[in-house]
Amino acid sequence: AQSVTQLGSHVSVSEGALVLLRCNYSSSVPPYLFWYVQYPNQGLQLLLKYTSAATLVKGINGFEAEFKKSETSFHLTKPSAHMSDAAEYFCAVSDFKTSYDKVIFGPGTSLSVIP
Amino acid sequence: EAQVTQNPRYLITVTGKKLTVTCSQNMNHEYMSWYRQDPGLGLRQIYYSMNVEVTDKGDVPEGYKVSRKEKRNFPLILESPSPNQTSLYFCASSLNRGGGGYTFGSGTRLTVV
């Protein structure tokens, strides 16, 4: 079965600093990959998705992620953190082997932004 | 406004008392799914549905039932809730099979005592 790991359950950055949230997946076939953001007391919101087109994917709120097949990674970055970026971030993969509808989520990374 | 609506937002119930959490989407999406979110475990899929009358188990289906009689609705049923089902539940829908990404509801926080 596919799986998703996110290195670091909690990441702190200073306002204006680079944001880097790590995601690795296990798969022998390139899957569909997603990043979601969850603000307190809200549902998840899709930030960006990779569906086998361009390897560098741009999303909302200035975030982007790069698919690297050789590293089985899909790390999320943002050049300059803003206070409003503080939230929980989830990487997810769509399981090709069983069903496209089975989306597997990583455990999440909580991002704190220090003024 | 395109959205997924869950009700109720908060629910406290007692062990063994049947309950239903409703989910409705207004985007004409074919694919819908239920997840539970627990600290340190991320989101785990309970059930999903590819269309009306077509459902399948996710990773943690035990103790739950679903039905998809209409395209817009996908209720989650707990026939005999137990304390280990205390969790935050999310309903989600998607237009494209797997590749489009989900639109999530606001969540239902369930406590079983």
Image (cartoon, rainbow, N blue to C red):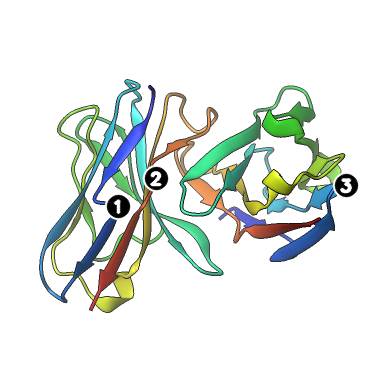
Q: Is residue B72 left or right of residue A102?
A: left
Residue at label 2? B106
Residue at label 1? B9
Could you tell me which residue is drawn at 72 percent across and 22 percent down? A53
Q: Residues at badges 2 and 1 in contact (C-beta under 8 Å)?
A: yes
Indicate the quadrant where residue A6 lies. bottom right
In the rendered image, the quadrant that contains the N terminus of chain B is top left
Residue B72 visible: yes
Image disc number at residue A18: 3
Crowding at label 2, few (<14), some or many (≥20) Cα neighbours within 10 Å?
many
Q: Position of residue A76 (x, y in %)?
A: 76, 44
Q: Is residue A68 left or right of residue B112?
A: right
Please tell me how many numbered marks the rendered image carries.
Answer: 3
Vertical placement of residue A60 versus B7, above or below: above
Name, please, the residue furthest toward the left: B17
Q: Residues at badges 3 and 1 in contact (C-beta under 8 Å)?
A: no
